[in-house]
Image: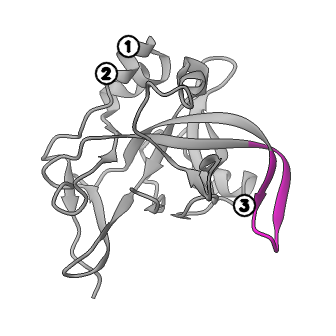
Amino acid sequence: MCNRYRAAAIKAGLLPDVFDHRKVKIRWPDISEEMFPDRVGLVARLDENGKMAPDAMRWGFPKVQTSYVTNVRNAASGYWKPWLKTEYRCLVPVTEFAEWSPGPPKGDRWFARADGDVMMFAGIWRPWTGTRGTKAAPAEGEHRLFAFLTTTPNAVVAPIHPKAMPVVLERADWDAWLTGAPEEALALQRPAGDDVLRLLPPAA
């Protein structure tokens, strides 16, 4: 689920010291605003001084079979446990995310916050060494990879995707996710309130 999202139009006033979009683009010109697995996206994590800072990472943990692992549902799995420690948690800014619908209409259906604000997904990251990118433009060496938690869908998402939805953090929960003990952080793996998201009209 949710293998496509958008991180465009990060609004002025939302953590301006962290997400100054012009500075981010200058520092990381390969950051994508239309996100698919393995593209480089914007995240925020705590730096060595314990302050929130922007970073650029590739979306998707190493491949399992043929697919990058972009979503974390079973947080008790040994695959994820090492990366749920405080130092590997991050926030993923998102303006819209898509879930595929069999229709009608068939295709991606997009969700956004009902209040028009930017969403923050509960993310985790890890270092990894190897080759990413495409055959035409391989990126070899050390990488930082991220994924985000999913949970049971709320009443807005369930009619389109009944299996899961991303964990959307409210602003009051950002610190708990980034710095809280494991049990406190994982208590946030819950669906957003039914009034938090809205389903956008299908594309014409």
Tag 3: residue type? Pro
Spatial CA distance of label 1 from label 2 is: 6 Å
What residue is disc 2 on? Answer: 187
- Viewer-proximal residue, 129 or 200? 129
| Residue count near mark 1 (Cα–Cα under 10 Å), binned few <14, some 14–19, many ≥20 | few
139 in the magenta segment: yes
Q: Residue at x 21, y 55 (%)?
A: 157
Identify the element where label 2 is drawn: loop
For mark 1, what is the residue?
183
Q: Which circle marks residue 166 in the picture?
A: none
Q: Which residue position holds label 3?
A: 29
Whether residue 22 sits left or right of residue 203 in the image: it is right
Q: Would residue 203 be seen by someone viewing this image from the given angle? A: yes
N-term mark: 2 or 3:
3
x and y percent of residue 127 in the render?
72, 35
Residue lying at 80% horizontally and 70% vertically, measured from the top left = 135
Picture layout, residue 46 above or below residue 170:
above
Q: Is there a contact, CB below 8 Å, between mark 1 and mark 2?
A: yes
Task: Please state the horizontal and vertical placement of residue 54, each as a whole percent of the image.
Answer: 61, 40
Q: Is residue 114 visible?
A: no
Residue segment shown in magenta = 130-143
Q: Residues within 10 Å of mark 2 (few under 14, many from 20)?
A: few
Around disc 3, counting alpha carbons within 10 Å, would you say few (fewer than 14), some (14 to 19), or many (20 or more)?
few
Residue 132 image position (x, y, % from top left): 76, 56
Which x, y percent locates residue 95?
39, 57
CA gap, disc 1 and disc 3: 37 Å
Name the residue type under label 1.
Glu
In-image side of 124 versus 11 (left or right): right
Q: Secondary structure at mark 3?
A: loop
Quadrant assignment for the C terminus: bottom left
